[in-house]
Amino acid sequence: MSQSHFIEYKRAQAAEDRTVSAARDAMNGKVKGIRALLPFLGPAFIASIAYVDPGNFATNIQSGALFGYKMLWVIILANLMAMLLQNMSAKLGIATGKSLPEICRDHMPKWLTWTMWVVSELAAMATDLAEFLGATLALNLLAGIPMLVATIITGIVTYLILMLEKFGFRPLEKFIAAFATLIGLCYLVETIFSKPDLTLVAYHSVVPWLGNKESIILAVGVIGATVMPHAIYLHSSLTQNRVVPRNDMEKIKIQKFSTKEILIAMTLAGFVNLAMMFMAASVFNTTGNSNVADITTAYHTLTPLLGSAAASVFLISLLASGISSSVVGTMAGQVIMQGFVGFTIPLWIRRVVTMLPTVIIVAIGVDPTKTLVISQVILSIVLPFPIIALIYFSQKKEIMGVLTNKRLTTILSTIFAVIILGLNIWLIVQTFMG
């Protein structure tokens, strides 16, 4: 390590120590209000990026363009699921000092652990595919960079951002939180531009509707794009050693702060997803442009309808989403491998390997948005694996101690798991039996 890097490392360590010290002051009641919450902000914002990745753009825009406001309830349902499941995952890391994949390795048969690792790696690759394609499309449309070149640029940029991990957890947390805020601001602007019907937004956010096979596929895709398998694995890792509790009382206090952060971060992610869909409903569906079935068409259609400023804001949010979620996806991939099978590979190798499917798809000219939607359906089918494991372990007192799930939490999370499984079965039946 060079002298300049060593100095930066020491500065980062000092900042990390200050964060932990501030967290302990908050737990001891020395500071109150928002200042008490600040040291705990970070893990949920990193996890929340997975909930506003380019896969969400693809499924939400298609849903809004084809079915108007009618599928907004799916986003509300998925976001409620996400809040509960991410809270359970964060709590697991706080209670045990281990990630969910590590807990699986400790308590499951070896064959099952390896099976879950393979399935989880496939899900991580499907995730990375969506994220890479999103950032690549944004660069291509925003700056006219050829798709293949844009893919390489995305890979290099995300790798450089991941290098921030060398300087402790705080720099990367701040970077990801800034990207989450940027995406949120972009969709606040898009909401102003698109002028959605707020009455319809309110109504369809709470009244369920499912129509034909296509709407079911998109509903499963929306859930797959919102409740992410790799985010469930990752969140437990982000909290396991961040502020290490010294006793049961500190575990309870850290968990309370973590819950508040999750509510803030996931509410922001939920607003972004709602805004994506009701923007598409307002701009495309109600103006007779329901044939907008991909991100490229959405961009080109937005320009004459809302102006070049709105179209550019759309692409900026897509670029921020693609780059930041690709960073988070790579972090999750490392956690999955290290947790399930106990070894890791150099970061640059994982970056190159997970880039390859995107490079191949771009090179042979496969439709990017269709690929995005299919990848989200794959994620939804894989999703029950981490959910079932999380429910099983988080209700065991010998593992969770004072943070063992309450009965209501276990019941609600089980209901969510059944809903996801039911939608998946419905999708398979509709697909193969018409």
Image (tube, helix red, strand yellow):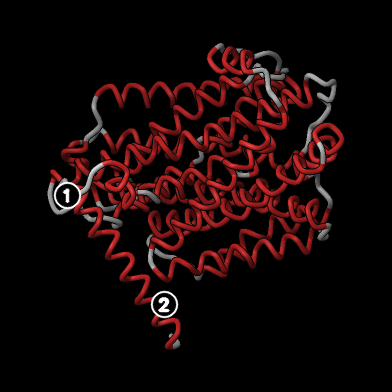
Labelled disc at residue 8: 2
**Amino acid type at image mark 2:** Glu
Classify mark 1: residues with Cα within 10 Å, few (<14), some (14-19) or many (20+).
few
Query: In what element is the residue under mark 2?
Result: helix
Residue 300 rendering spot, x and y as whole percentages: 85, 40
Q: Please say whether residue 364 is visible from this viewpoint.
A: yes
Looking at the image, residue 25 lies above or below residue 299: below
Answer with left or right where residue 381 lies relative to residue 60: left
Residue visible at 60% across and 22% down in the picture: 72
Q: Please say whether residue 105 is visible from this viewpoint.
A: no
Q: Quadrant of residue 153?
A: bottom right
- Counting the numbered discs, the total is 2
Q: Earlier in the sequence, mark 1 or mark 2?
A: 2
The alpha-carbon separation of the residues under discs 1 and 2 comes to 30 Å
Tell me the quadrant of the picture where the N terminus can be found. bottom left
Query: In what element is the residue under mark 1?
Result: loop
Residue 403 rendering spot, x and y as whole percentages: 21, 38
Tell me the quadrant of the picture where the C terminus can be found. top right
Toward the viewer: 270 or 303? Answer: 303
- Mark 1 lies on residue: 30
